[in-house]
Structures are given as structure tokens and as C-alpha cells.
Image (cartoon, helix red, strand yellow):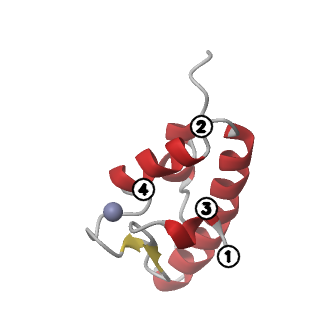
Amino acid sequence: MTPLDGLAHRPLRPIWLCRLDANPWPCGEAKLVLLATFADDRPALLALLSRLQREAEDHLTQLDSGRSNNLTDRFLSWAQPPDH
Ligand SMILES: [Zn+2]
């Protein structure tokens, strides 16, 4: 059981598109739900996202014939605390 199991907007592996709306995951709805779920524990959210980012980079690099993907903006930038 991971926090993603409760999400309607889950990533479809290995292409990392949302199962519900087919946007690149995390889609807008997934971000809103994750932010709400981890409202009191932002470090746990960032740890989860960096794990998922590495997994997605592995998958997408294979799909793209070895072209490396940097997904930091997509997975992490939106979740940084707004304190600076
Ligand atoms: Zn979605």
C-alpha cells in the first residue's frame, strides 16, 4: 500500500501518463490531492516524489531509446514549500 493507491489520478507505468485524464503524471488533479494528503508533512511528499521521479526517469529513458530525461521540474518543483 502506497499513498498512490488511494488516488484516482494514478500514473500509468511505464509511460507515466495519468490513468484518468492521460496528462503527464503528476497531472493537476494528482498534485492537488497529493498536496492535501501531505499538507502536514511536506518532507514526506518530497521524498515520495523524488522516488517516483527516479522510477519514471528509468522507464522513460528506456522508452526513449536511452535519451535521458530530467523530470525534476515535472515531479518536484511544484511541491517545494513556498518559503523562499
Ligand atoms: Zn489525472
Q: CA distance from mark 2 to mark 3?
A: 20 Å
Residue identified by numbered label 3: 53
User: Which amino acid, by three-letter code, is at mark 3?
Assistant: Gln
Q: Which numbered mark, 1 or 3, is in the foreground of this view?
A: 1
Foreground: disc 4 or disc 2: 2
Mark 3 CB lies closer than 8 A to ligand 1? no
Q: CA distance from mark 4 to mark 3?
A: 14 Å
Which three-letter amino acid code belongs to the residue tagged 1? Answer: Met
Secondary structure found at label 2 = loop
Badge 4 density bin: few <14, some 14–19, many ≥20, Cα 10 Å:
some
Q: Secondary structure at mark 1?
A: loop
- Note whether ligand 1 is within 8 Å of mark 1: no
Mark 3 or mark 1, which is nearer the start of the sequence?
1
Residue at horizontal 52%, vertical 50%? 34
Q: Which mark is residue 30?
A: 4
The span from disc 1 to disc 4 (Cα, nearest Å) is: 17 Å
Mark 2 highlights which residue?
39
| Label 4 C-beta lies within 8 Å of the nearest ligand 1 atom | yes
Work out whether mark 4 precedes mark 2 in sequence or the reverse, and give the earlier one.
Answer: 4
Provide the residue designation for mark 1.
1
In this view, the residue in front, 42 or 40, is 40
N-term-proximal mark, 2 vs 1:
1
Residue at 55 percent across and 57 percent down: it is 70
Q: Amino acid at mark 2?
A: Ala
